[in-house]
Amino acid sequence: MGSEVKTTPRAAPRKLTGKKQEIDEFIDQFEYFLFDCDGVLWQGDVLLPKVVETLDMLRNKGKKLVFVTNNSSKSREAYSKKFAKFGIPVSVDEVFGSSYSTAVAISRVYRMPPGKRVFVIGEEGVEHELAAEGIPFFGGSAPLPFPDDEVAEHVGPDPSVWAVVTGLDRKISYAKLAMAGGYLRDPDVHFFATNTDSTFPTHGKLLPGAGTCSAPLILMTGRTPTSFGKPSLAMMESIERKYSLDRSKACMVGDRLNTDIKFGLKSGLKGTLAVLTGVSTEAEILEAGEAGEGPDVYLDCLGDLLG
Ligand SMILES: O=C(O)[C@H](O)[C@H](O)COP(=O)(O)O
């Protein structure tokens, strides 16, 4: 596993003016652009202005694009379909989601032993990616095979359970949490989270994020999950392996300071670009800059990269 990159004092975040030469100089520094999706490319089901043209422009310049999302509710395949719906051709392989990151870590880094299984608090994205990696699991979107009020009879350690994985689960229940908590009482059972985002921005509102699904278990067990989403280095290392990415030629583009921008900074990417179409505001970006935690540059919206 690689290590966190030490940061040196950094300049305050600079707003790109939109002048062509300045924009071109910025873009030319990079070979790879890692894009967050929600709040950068779209807001829920609404595509943001000039996103298609901006991505086309970067592709025409020969830039490699990877779409890195913490949204665990959708698989990479479902994401690729979402792009297609917006008229943006993006292959499954260009999408790197937190559910995929988690499944890959379980099968290829931790190498879950045969005969074991994973208990899931999460949705289709987690289930799909675990299945694609050949990882046996239960829970998830399937109803528990007993009435909720009988959960106490079914809670307990289970030698077949190797890990509990939590992602965003909009049908989370007391019974599911009780089951997960029971498995996690065994210290040999891994506690994994696809991501620990506090909020889930959707339709212009901030709804509870995936982190709120692991939080009750943290409180209950005193354990902290290993997260495989932004800003974890585990996710960056996985991206690096998959795309032969050179961090010194990559720029992270995101709307959120504590996931996207932190991810770029912690990983020592060459650049970070924030946009103001998502979670973090200009005031927050400037304040983060004072603490050395802001992006290198920011724009009102991604489309401004067209100059
Ligand atoms: O709670 C969550 O899972 C996240 O807030 C959400 O899915 C973020 O996705 P991203 O902005 O990384 O695409």
Image (cartoon, helix red, strand yellow):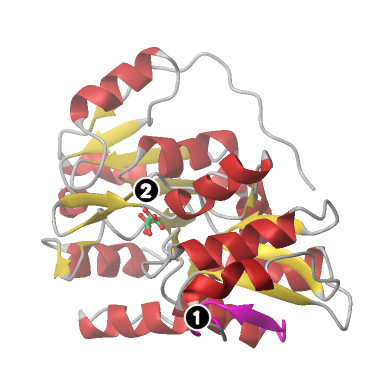
Q: Work out whether 243 lies above or below 27.
A: below
Q: Residue 298 has which mark?
A: none
Q: Quadrant of residue 136?
A: bottom right
> Residues at badges 1 and 2 in contact (C-beta under 8 Å)?
no
54, 289: nearer the viewer: 289
Q: Is residue 211 visible?
A: yes
User: What residue is shown with label 2?
Assistant: 253
Which segment did they paint magenta?
133-144
Image coords of residue 63 (percent x, y): 43, 62
Q: Quadrant of residue 256?
A: top left
Q: Judge from the rendering whether residue 179 lies leftward or rightward of residue 207; answer left or right.
A: right
Q: Crowding near pointer 2: few (<14 within 10 Å), some, many (20+)?
A: many
Q: Judge from the rendering whether residue 69 lies leftward or rightward of residue 199; answer left or right.
A: right
Q: Nearer the viewer, mark 1 or mark 2?
A: 1
- Which circle's residue, 1 or 2, is located before the other in the chain? 1
Q: Residue 147 has which mark?
A: 1
Q: Amino acid at mark 2?
A: Val
Q: Work out whether 141 lies above or below 55.
A: below
Image coords of residue 26 (percent x, y): 34, 40
Q: Amino acid at mark 1?
A: Pro
Image coords of residue 169 (percent x, y): 43, 66
150, 235: nearer the viewer: 150
Residue drawn 21% across the image and 63% down it = 42
